[in-house]
Image (cartoon, rainbow, N blue to C red):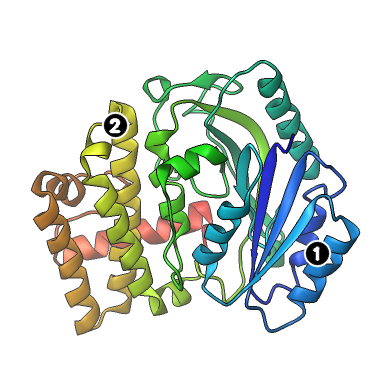
Amino acid sequence: MTYISFVVPCYNSQDYLERCVNTLMPENKEIEIIIVNDGSTDKTAELAERYQQKYPDTVRVIHKKNGGHGSAVNEGLKNANGLYFKVVDSDDWLDTENLKKVLEQLKKWDKENTRVDLVVCNYIYDHLFEDKRKQMTYRNVFKKNEIMGWDDIGHFNPSQYIIMHAAMFRTDVLRESKVVLPEHTFYVDNLFTHQPLIYSKTVCYLDLDLYHYFIGRDDQSVNEKVLMKRIDQQIKVNKMILDRVTTEEEKNAPKKLRKYLIRNLSIMTSISDIHLLLINTPESRAKRKDLWDTIKQRDEKLYRQLRYRTTAGTTYLPLGRFGDGLTMCGYKLARVMYKFN
């Protein structure tokens, strides 16, 4: 039985790939590691092939033309055989001891014929260059080690949302959701962890620090300057999540899940809004207005909820210098507190 399919999307990852894969227990035949080489031009392909040769029962390598992170995740999902599916970015890594505990829990559920659609674990913002770490947990949202439905969950704090690093979905749930990520687009992980939620009937939180999210490189997609350059891709994903939130399917989601789905859109929109403010050009101001106009045209009630309620914290305030100034103060404070980029 293959319990977890780990998909490692790679593009020019020669400096990080070994650290990543070495934490995924390649000697264990109850998991599989799918390394997707997304058109790398360095030694990534060579390193990946070495792992496949050394662990032929566990590691598979897929070579493809460059299509971006989402394209690599799509390819991994197509080829996954595991009961659960977990994306591990090639510059990140897992805590091996806690991974063993997660695997033991999955095996226990399997033997008991217990179905859990979504497993949530803690993750660490790991600022290696500064030797600083920030733990992100969900203890106030979920009862640990207890299988819950969405009606049973607690309240998410402003810093908490279910990101790819925290989530491990059953593979059949992902396929049922028909989630397909756009190519040559960053920030698609937001869509990946949003679309399958309404298909996830049960969730269990394991209070384990599993995922280490490497933060601090200048070329990272979450780096403020990089995000500003890629703002059109951020807005594209933002509007795709808007498309999901305004479907009848998501409108009819369980009450607490519906609240979270709107909150997820709120966070995504706040990121777009703030970075358009940071760019501060006539073009960026036009894009900002277009984003809000699009939301209003799609669902005026939702627009009012996002625009005039502090759904994601102090980020949505009326247009104008005063509101913009308070928005930026809220963003800078959150950045210091949570060290998310």
Residue at 12 percent of width and 49 percent of height = 299
- In the displayed structure image, the side of residue 61 where residue 315 appears, left or right: left
- Residue type at mark 2 is Ala
Task: Give the number of the disc on residue 253.
Answer: 2
Residue at (67, 15) in percent of width and height = 112
Question: Residue 82 appears at what percent x and percent y?
Answer: 66, 41
Which is nearer the eye, 124 or 110? Answer: 110
| Residue bearing the label numbered 1 | 18
| 18 vs 282, nearest the viewer | 18
The answer to which image quadrant residue 214 occupies is: bottom right
Is disc 2 placed on a helix, strand or loop? loop
Q: Mark 2 Cα within 10 Å, few/some/many (few <14, many 20+)? A: some
Residue at image point 16% right, 46% down = 302
Residue 9: give its label.
none
Q: What's the residue at 67%, 77% (across, down)?
A: 12
Disc 1 is placed on an element classified as: helix
Q: Amino acid at mark 1?
A: Glu
